[in-house]
Image (tube, helix red, strand yellow):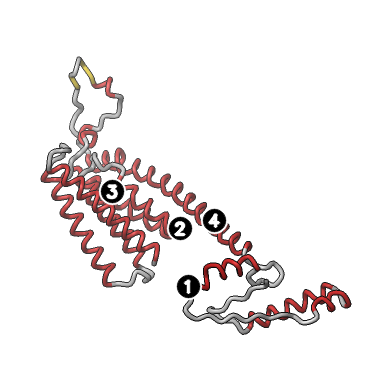
Amino acid sequence: MVLNQYALKSVTSAMITIAIVWALNMINVFVIDKEVTTSCFVLCLIVYLIGKVVCKINKLSKWWIKYFILLWVVCIVTIITMFLTFHAVLVFLLPIVYTTMYSSKKMMVYTYILTVISITFSVYAGYYFGICDTNMVLLPGKPMEDYLIGENVFALQDINNNVLKSLGMFWVLPRCMICAAFTLVCSNISKIISLNVSYAKKMENMAGTDGMTGLYNRSKYLDMVGGGYKQEDKLAVIYWDINFLKRINDTIGHEAGDKLILAVAESIRSISNENDNGYRI
């Protein structure tokens, strides 16, 4: 649920950025066609509001919500890349970045498949409806100097005669390959972060746990005394002491004394519930 909340905040931040770009373009800070950018902004806003309503009327803890959020992000990205095919060239990687917070290989594969579909659709739709990159029309495959026939004179190639094939090979396939490589990198980063968090949590637990009994140790107890008491309205504290433990250690041996300590610790643990904590101090 917490991860879904962060994802929602991230989508809202992205939508605010889109609104700022649209507003700046409307006051001529940018030089993008106003009709195209307005269409892009309005469609993104509609999809955004629909997604917010779906998340509002459903609990964020539901299993399918995370899949919906990523689909929601991909839809917004598809609209942006369709209308602003040249200006928003890096946006198609955004859903992969979102997926890293879930630390799930299944989610990563799901998002990559959606992204491939998004790239394919937005490239072909953007060719006809978006602010098309000149490369999509002319398909030059050489350095700039090979097309200069004089000072500031550019030799135009033939217009793209095979849109289906050339856009697929020139745009869709390379982007999907880049996205695949980016997905692998993000997946590994997510895995490393997850392992580091698990290791840090394990170290924290070990630092506060008595190695013999498995109960919390004296250090953890003192931390609880310093801060935990203040957060409770009602609190009960019970102290146990093992009678004649020193005599047992001296006469029978420390191994017998340890077994007695373990038996007492297990007795305490057996009557404890989720609201109780046991400490060996």
> Residue 147's spot in the image, x, y percent?
24, 22
Q: Residues within 10 Å of mark 1 (few under 14, many from 20)?
A: few
Q: Quadrant of residue 248?
A: bottom right
Q: Which residue is mark 2?
A: 103
Vertical position of residue 162 compared to residue 53: above or below: above
Distance from label 3 to label 1 (Cα)? 55 Å
For marks 4 and 2, the one nearer the N-term is 2
Q: CA distance from mark 4 to mark 1?
A: 31 Å
Cα–Cα span, label 2 and label 1: 33 Å
Precedes in sequence: disc 3 or disc 2: 2
**Nearest to the observer: residue 246 or residue 176:** 246
Identify the image quadrant of residue 50: bottom left
Residue drawn 47% across the image and 79% down it:
233
Spatial distance from mark 3 to mark 2, Cα to Cα? 26 Å
Up-down relation of residue 57 to residue 18 (above or below): below
Which residue type does callout 4 highlight? Leu
Q: Amino acid at mark 3?
A: Thr
Q: Is residue 229 left or right of residue 262?
A: left
Disc 3 target residue: 120
Identify residue for label 1: 231
The residue mark sitting in front, 3 or 1, is 1
For marks 3 and 1 on the same chain, the one whose residue lies earlier in the sequence: 3
Image coordinates for residue 80, horizontal then vertical, percent: 23, 48
Q: Is residue 49 above or below residue 234?
A: above
Is disc 4 in contact with disc 2, using a CB cutoff of under 8 Å?
no
Residue at the spot of label 4: 195
